[in-house]
Image (cartoon, rainbow, N blue to C red):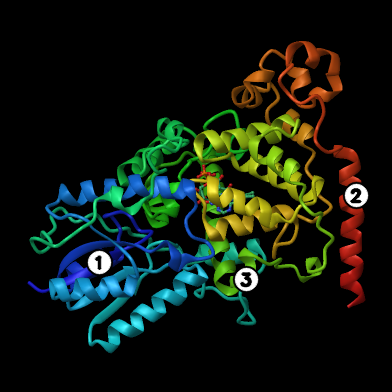
Amino acid sequence: MAHALVWFRRDLRLADNPALLAALDAGLAPVPVYIHAPEEESPWEPGAASRVWLDRSLRALDADLRARGSRLILRRGDSLAELERLVAETGAVSVYWNRLYEPACIARDRRVERALRALGLGAESHNAALLIEPWAVKTGQGEPYRVFTPFWRKARQTLVDVRPADAPVRLPAPPEGLASLEADGLGLRPPPGQPRWDRGFWSFWTPGEAGAQDLLEAFLDGAVHGYREQRNLPDRVGTSRLSPHLHFGEISPRQVVARLRGGEWPAELRQDVEHFLGELGWREFGHHLLFHFPHMAQENLDPRFRRFAWAEPDPALLAAWRRGRTGVPLVDAGMRELWATGWMHNRVRMVTASFLTKNLRYHWRHGAEWFWNTLVDADLANNSQGWQWSAGTGADAAPYFRIFSPPAQARKFDPRGAYIRRWLPELAGLPDEALAAPWEHAELCRRLAPDYPLRPIVDLKASREAALAAYSGAGAAASRR
Ligand SMILES: Cc1cc2nc3c(=O)[nH]c(=O)nc-3n(C[C@H](O)[C@H](O)[C@H](O)COP(=O)(O)OP(=O)(O)OC[C@H]3O[C@@H](n4cnc5c(N)ncnc54)[C@H](O)[C@@H]3O)c2cc1C
């Protein structure tokens, strides 16, 4: 049986993996390969939290392959050079992979495809990551969509026959003696002697395909009931938490959709299911935008913000935001959740992002970069979209003048302060009514929360007004053009 290389990247699963199945369908023996080449994703090389996740995900994939008679060949270096080396070592006649949509990956993959074809090899790519590929839906004028609702209305219609494939039961072993690095050799974990800041992550997460399936089942048994309401409450597991698994392709959105559709949902639950599908739709939309507007990871999608008067970051204030020491409890609780778990609840992501871009008026890039390094689900499409949406600079963004009030958000979505108390234990002794805005209860705070900043690093009301004034300036600049 001739061999084919199956080049794994962010499709770290065996079920519903079109590249793997295509190799098998072609009657070839797949050699599963992962090549660590972070420089090729520059300037968005995987951040620290992504790397520790990847380390575990690759080990899980290797274990799943071994359970079926195969194993994962790990290499490091230039992707094309390593693929060519592996072709020489295995006699493979083709290379199969699943597509990525980040600009640097698209450019690299095109180069690889051309080079492999020039060598007379088969080179075939598939869609494993999305429900609808970015070019598959267009407006009536043949343009990419810039607004979510019409995008999803159209895209949703294409989801008729969603049938994910099962994982192969057995796989042939790769040629004997084929060299592979140890996972430790990829340098994904913090080096010895450095603090293991990720230690706390693993009571929340189990990277790998089985961990993803468990979360999906737990979601269908639990949080999907009442998802529309509960998804906004950060103190509970009200969402699926599938984002890192989806990012690394440990589960496919097709699998999620098929499982949702397979359920016999009572009428009152259908709206929850539909709402959840809509969130997957936002993920699709983010990829659609990034594909058509590849500059969106660094530049405002809304050109009116080109000359917006962002403030020059004060390193001490930026550090206070990063460490969860702003003196604004909901913001700080979110930033501490992020540090402790590598994840932050969506509502709190919006609040922390609004605080950085509106109250501090720092360019959203400063926040996007921190999230990129600290989120286990850091994803260029979703992160860029989330930050531009929050900053009001995106294609389909919240208007800039809609500025979140962290105390109002805390009173509405964390009314008993359970989320704030969980992540800010130094505030645990304060009464519920003081938790959203402790500076309004200064005397109480001095006594009961002496370790927490007495007042916010920026005056919320004055900074809000300054941001609105700056926004009117940007709007005026746009209308003058
Ligand atoms: C400033 C900011 C930055 C963000 N950065 C990222 C990021 O780097 N990676 C990332 O995956 N998401 C990002 N998001 C979107 C969202 O916060 C997360 O996808 C969500 O919190 C993940 O939790 P979940 O899996 O429990 O979501 P669920 O509510 O269970 O949703 C299911 C899936 O839908 C997708 N999804 C949900 N909400 C969104 C959204 N608003 N935009 C795009 N996709 C969505 C995710 O893949 C998610 O796993 C960001 C949002 C903001 C406001």
Front residue (pair 354, 48): 48
Spatial CA distance of label 3 from label 1 is: 30 Å
- Residue 20 seen anywhere in this rendered image of the structure: yes
Circle 2: residue type? Ala
Disc 2 residue crowd, few under 14, some 14–19, many 20+, Cα 10 Å: some
**Which residue is painted at 30% across and 47% down in the image?**
184
Circle 3: residue type? His
**Which residue is painted at 63% across and 37% down in the image?**
335
Residue 422: x and y, percent? 59, 23
Circle 1: residue type? Val
Q: Check disc 1 and report the residue beneath it.
A: 6
Spatial CA distance of label 2 from label 3 is: 28 Å
Residue 141: x and y, percent? 64, 82
Element under label 3?
Answer: helix
Quadrant containing the C terminus is bottom right
**Which residue is painted at 67% across and 57% down in the image?**
365
Horizontal side of 112 relative to 239 (left or right) equals: left
Horizontal side of 408 relative to 62 (left or right) equals: right
Disc 3 residue crowd, few under 14, some 14–19, many 20+, Cα 10 Å: some
Disc 1 residue crowd, few under 14, some 14–19, many 20+, Cα 10 Å: many
Element under label 1?
Answer: strand
Disc 2 to disc 3: CB gap under 8 Å = no
Q: Check disc 3 and report the residue beneath it.
A: 295
Q: Check disc 2 and report the residue beneath it.
A: 466
Residue 51: x and y, percent? 42, 50
Quadrant containing the N terminus is bottom left
Which residue occupies the extreme top position in the image? 447
Horizontal side of 182 relative to 313 (left or right) equals: left
Pointer 2 or 3: first along the chain:
3
